[in-house]
Image (cartoon, rainbow, N blue to C red):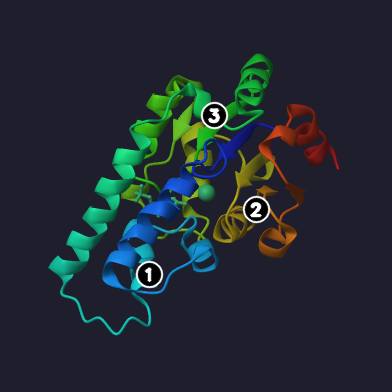
Amino acid sequence: QLEAVIFDLDGVITDSAEFHYQAWQALADELGIPFNREKNERLKGVSRMESLDIVLEGSGLKLTEAERLRLAEKKNDHYKQMIGSITPEHLLPGIPELLDSLAQRGIDAALASASLNAPLILERLGIARRFQAIADPAGLRRGKPDPEIFLTAAELLGVTPRNCIGVEDASAGIAAIKAAGMTAVGIGSAELLGEADLLLSSTSELTLERLLELLRK
Ligand code: G6P
Ligand code: MG
């Protein structure tokens, strides 16, 4: 029985995954490091500093901790400038309707995003109060694909992982949901998200009916 839907943010609720990509691409270009959308897939769901390490991989650059922090800050300043333009119109298709249906049915909604900018984005989207729990990534020891962030969200809600559905656009995120003992819905391509229990090509297909049916099986 479905007790809660636990959402990733970037690429699921709004298209901020594209802003993350653009900000990393700009940083890589500035440093003269090769980077592209394919490599960017590995950054999805991964924390800011871990993402930087992946971007710098193979560059031969030897950086001090202070320099690494400065580069991460630079990427984040650029990213924050982009998300400053987010409005409720930037909710991905089907998301407002799904949040409405969940509220009507008394099914909880929670957020499990690795982004420290998540609360700000929810505010800008005008949906901050629609979530009964938000797992704070700053307080976690391990990032996705570890299940910790999804388990933390379930714990905050006081629900059983087995009765939760997680929604993700990243391979690391699907792995985290499965490791948490939850049912995983992937938004994207089978190539990248093959482990998902249900794969949808767009959030417009993400309806409460579909989710309820998934847990009935
Ligand atoms: C999410 C995104 C990642 C991003 C991470 C940290 O997991 O999918 O691309 O790197 O959050 O985001 P932040 O806003 O804290 O830099
Ligand atoms: Mg994501």
Q: Position of residue 67 (x, y in %)?
A: 16, 68
Residue 76 seen in this snapshot? yes
Query: At 21% across and 67% down in the image, what residue appears?
Result: 68
- Secondary element at image label 1: helix
Q: Position of residue 79 (x, y in %)?
A: 33, 46
- Secondary element at image label 3: loop
Sequence-first disc among 3 and 2:
3
Amino acid residing under circle 3:
Leu
| Disc on res. 123 | none
Amino acid residing under circle 1:
Val
Sequence-first disc among 1 and 2:
1
Residue that label 3 marks = 91
Image vertical order of residue 87 relative to residue 144, above or below = above
Tell which tag, 1 or 2, sits nearer the viewer.
Answer: 1
Residue that label 1 marks = 55
Query: At 39% across and 46% down in the image, what residue appears?
Result: 115
The one nearer the camera, 83 or 120, is 83
Sequence-first disc among 1 and 3:
1
Query: At 34% across and 58% down in the image, what residue appears?
Result: 26
Residue that label 2 marks = 181
Q: Position of residue 98 (x, y in %)?
A: 66, 25
- Tell me: 101 left or right of 125: right
Alpha carbons under labels 1 and 2: distance apart: 31 Å
Q: Are the residues tagged 1 and 2 within 8 Å (C-beta)?
A: no
Q: Position of residue 62 (x, y in %)?
A: 21, 81
Task: Count how many numbered circles sit on residues in the image.
Answer: 3
- Tell me: is circle 1 under 8 Å from ligand 1: no
Image vertical order of residue 150 relative to residue 126, above or below = below
Image vertical order of residue 217 relative to residue 88, above or below = below
Amino acid residing under circle 2:
Gly
Residue 141 seen in this snapshot? no
Tell which tag, 3 or 2, sits nearer the viewer.
Answer: 3
